[in-house]
Image: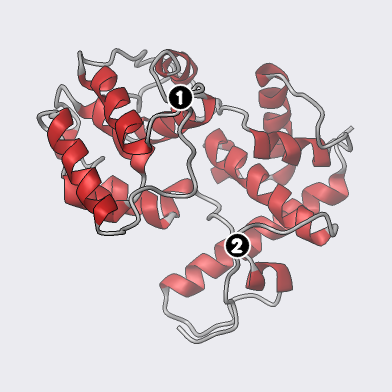
């Protein structure tokens, strides 16, 4: 049964995290919250579209001028695999795919000791021991070999299609879908507002809210049904209108409750007291 006291705590987290974003964007002085957990640890925004990397990605690789290019979906797949704006800026949007050129550029960054990939997304390697630059460009060949066909009427079907490509596990495929839904490719999907992929973090978040073991295995169908119930109880229309943002909040709420319950801490700390 859904624990309404925890739903209230989640609503508090959502409110405080959004308040932090608004004050930060307005260049208001810290602290932006009195909550000690939010002051000390990093959490993603309530809405994925507000996250720093997604804002950059939307402006440079996901912008409308690229939507009708044959390589567009493949570029989104490659871009989210890398997910680090300085690297993506150095590579440039791949109007024409050239594996050797991209590999050489990645190796150049590696030789210079620069960060190449984000730490937030993990590429599914399926047991491969290849160096990451080799793996990413080899997978890229599969994305760009021919135009990636998606189901323009369904986020869920597109998610399943993307998982047939190397490196696109359930999590990475869901990230690509979350980008494509804001473009011509999937913006008319019938399940635009009502579907999201269940991930490990959102599973733990739901297990907390429903008073189960954190390791309880949820099916995608049950998780989606419960996400919809949580969305109704939260009473926040903008989350009911975008289930993927609600899924994201469940993941971040699990991190918050981990600290609150003394079960551990997120890996990234945050200076919520300092200037700027």
Q: For the residue labelled by badge 2, is the local secondary structure a helix, a strand or a loop? A: helix
Q: Is residue 234 left or right of residue 192?
A: right
Viewer-side residue, 32 vs 233: 32
Left or right position of 135 against 231: left
Residue that numbered label 1 is attached to: 128
- Quadrant containing the N terminus is top right
| Neighbourhood count class around disc 2 (C-alpha, 10 Å): few under 14, some 14–19, many 20 upward | many
Whether 219 is drawn above or below 12: the answer is above
Residue sitting at x 45%, y 28%: 129
Does residue 60 show up? no
Q: Which residue is mark 2?
A: 17
Could you tell me if residue 181 is visible in this image?
A: yes
User: Under tag 1, what secondary structure?
Assistant: loop
Quarter of the image for the C terminus: give it. Answer: bottom left
Q: Residue at x 35, y 28 (%)?
A: 187
Q: Residue 186 location, x and y as percent?
A: 35, 24
Mark 2 in CB contact with mark 1 (< 8 angstroms): no
* Whether residue 5 is situated above or below residue 155 in the rendered picture: below
Please indicate whether residue 61 sits to the left or right of residue 150 in the image: left
- Which residue occupies the foreground of this view, 28 or 202? 202
């Amino acid at each position: 049964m859904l624990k309404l006291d925890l739903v209230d705590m989640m609503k508090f987290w959502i409110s405080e995290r959004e308040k932090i974003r608004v004050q930060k964007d307005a260049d208001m002085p810290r602290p932006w919250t009195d909550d000690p957990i939010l002051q000390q640890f990093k959490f993603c925004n309530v809405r994925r579209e507000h996250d720093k990397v997604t804002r950059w990605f939307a402006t440079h690789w996901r912008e409308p001028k690229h939507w009708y290019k044959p390589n567009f979906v493949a570029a989104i797949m490659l871009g989210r695999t890398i997910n680090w704006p300085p690297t993506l800026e150095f590579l440039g949007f791949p109007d024409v795919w050239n594996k050797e050129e991209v590999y050489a550029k990645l190796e150049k960054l590696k030789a210079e000791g620069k960060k190449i990939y984000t730490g937030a997304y993990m590429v599914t390697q399926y047991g491969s021991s290849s160096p990451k630059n080799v793996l990413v460009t080899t997978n890229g060949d599969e994305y760009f070999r021919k135009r990636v066909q998606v189901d323009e009427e369904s986020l869920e079907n597109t998610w399943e299609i993307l998982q047939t490509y190397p490196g696109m596990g359930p999590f990475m495929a869901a990230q690509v879908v979350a980008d494509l839904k804001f473009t011509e490719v999937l913006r008319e999907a019938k399940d635009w507002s009502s579907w999201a992929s269940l991930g490990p973090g959102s599973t733990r978040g739901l297990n907390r809210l429903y008073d189960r073991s954190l390791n309880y295995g949820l099916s995608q169908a049950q998780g989606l049904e419960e996400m919809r119930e949580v969305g109704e109880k939260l009473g926040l229309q903008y989350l009911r209108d975008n289930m993927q943002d609600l899924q994201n909040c469940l993941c971040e709420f699990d991190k918050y409750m981990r600290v609150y319950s003394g079960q551990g801490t997120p890996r990234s700390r945050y200076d919520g007291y300092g200037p700027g």
